[in-house]
Image (cartoon, rainbow, N blue to C red):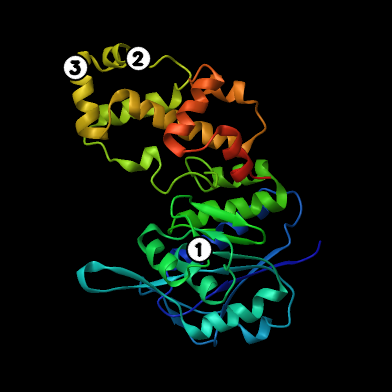
């Protein structure tokens, strides 16, 4: 099997999880395959001196950038680094030396991927010009201001634009890496790797960095169980009366809990959960809009269409065309 050389850029103050997360995903691919995946992951730095990450953990590079400059690279993964300024303001930093090496390595690379604020390195290297890209939400405004030629979208957890992939913050490096695996070997294998990682699910690219399960942290186990019930019974009617009965509350008490704990009315929260589930289904499969509508409790395509217009300012068909993964 042809070797798939994956180079992860390494430099001082880099976020540790950005560096270690992707190799962990690629290593688990081998466990799930009957034959070698062909992946070979190396950490490349300007020199072979130990690198101190943002977590204070020191990491040894495998190779220098110069030593892989003449190699055919399958995937170049570029993590990021930040500094914290006055008022706890987060700012992405791009080492000019690393930027230069990324610019030099990219032409000999099949695909380039940034993790978290590594998108700033790609932008400084000129690799995001005219492309749509994402980054950690705390530095998206900085990226848009410094690189007006980049279509910055801070919402998705990762974006693919041609042979350039950009990922959102920290743990999204796992989702991005799983997407790269799916691109190479298919969704089924990527899902098996996700299970090995004990991930709740393999999130598709269009899922928001502020998705419904992540927006609020409920203060009671009862409300958490209610949220879980909603997300696992989206095709049910899910009326206020039905949910109130499950929690042994009055309709008025339930409405107050939604407002205080989840920041929305029951109807608005349920619609948000249904739209997010429909987004995932549209990205990952070829189900008809009628089936998507039924599976997620919308009933009709017209209701699904209105919810997408209201929540995302687009139609289900337009959304699928934009975010459909292979």
Q: Given this view, does label 1 or label 3 mark the residue nearer the observer?
A: 3
Q: Is any atom of residue 99 visible in this view?
A: yes
Answer with mark 2 or mark 1, whichever residue precedes in sequence.
Answer: 1
Residue located beneath label 2 in the image: 239
Q: Position of residue 122 (x, y in %)?
A: 54, 71
- Pick out the residue farthest to the right: 1
How many numbered marks have been drawn onto this rendered protein structure?
Answer: 3
* Cα separation between marks 2 and 1: 41 Å
At horizontal 63% and vertical 55% (from top left) the residue drawn is 180
At horizontal 65% and vertical 78% (from top left) the residue drawn is 105
* Cα separation between marks 2 and 3: 13 Å
Q: Position of residue 144 (x, y in %)?
A: 44, 65
Residue located beneath label 3 in the image: 252
Image quadrant of residue 77? bottom right
Residue located beneath label 1 in the image: 115
Q: Is any atom of residue 192 visible in this view?
A: no
At horizontal 58% and vertical 62% (from top left) the residue drawn is 131
Q: Position of residue 191 (x, y in %)?
A: 60, 42
Residue 138 located left or right of residue 88: right
Q: Given this view, does label 2 or label 1 mark the residue nearer the observer?
A: 2
Answer with mark 2 or mark 3, whichever residue precedes in sequence.
Answer: 2
Could you say which is closer to the camera, residue 232 or residue 192?
Answer: 232
Q: Secondary structure at mark 3?
A: helix
Badge 2, how many Cα within 10 Å: few under 14, some, many 20+?
A: few
Q: Are marks 2 and 3 in contact (CB under 8 Å)?
A: no
Could you say which is closer to the camera, residue 185 or residue 242?
Answer: 242
Q: Position of residue 262 (x, y in %)?
A: 27, 34
Q: Secondary structure at mark 2?
A: loop
């Amino acid at each position: 099997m042809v070797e798939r050389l994956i180079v992860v850029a390494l430099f001082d103050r880099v976020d540790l999880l950005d560096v270690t997360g992707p190799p962990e995903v690629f290593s688990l691919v081998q466990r799930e395959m009957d034959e070698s995946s062909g992946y070979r992951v190396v950490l490349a730095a300007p020199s072979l001196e130990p690198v101190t990450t943002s977590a204070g953990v020191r990491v040894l590079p495998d190779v220098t950038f110069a030593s892989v400059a003449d190699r055919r690279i399958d995937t170049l993964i570029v993590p990021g680094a930040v500094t914290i300024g006055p008022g706890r303001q987060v700012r992405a930093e791009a080492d000019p030396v690393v930027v230069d090496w990324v610019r030099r390595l990219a032409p000999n690379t099949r695909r380039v991927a940034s993790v978290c604020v590594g998108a700033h390195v790609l932008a400084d290297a000129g690799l995001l010009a005219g492309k749509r890209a994402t980054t950690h939400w705390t530095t998206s405004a900085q990226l848009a201001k410094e690189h007006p030629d980049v279509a910055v979208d801070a919402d998705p957890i990762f974006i693919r634009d041609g042979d350039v992939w950009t990922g959102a913050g920290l743990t999204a490096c796992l989702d991005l890496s799983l997407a790269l695996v799916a691109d190479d070997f298919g969704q089924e294998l990527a899902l098996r790797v996700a299970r090995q990682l004990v991930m709740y699910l393999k999130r598709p690219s269009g899922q928001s960095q502020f998705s419904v399960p992540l927006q609020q942290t409920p203060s009671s186990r009862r409300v958490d169980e209610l949220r879980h019930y909603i997300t696992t019974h989206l095709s049910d009617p899910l009326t206020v009366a039905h949910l109130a009965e499950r929690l042994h509350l009055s309709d008025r008490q339930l409405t107050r809990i939604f407002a205080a704990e989840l920041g929305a009315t029951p109807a608005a929260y349920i619609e948000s959960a249904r739209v997010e589930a429909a987004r995932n289904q549209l990205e990952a499969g070829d189900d008809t809009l009628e089936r998507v509508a039924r599976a997620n409790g919308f009933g009709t395509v017209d209701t699904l269409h209105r919810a997408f217009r209201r929540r995302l300012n687009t139609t289900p068909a337009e959304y699928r065309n934009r975010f459909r993964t292979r």
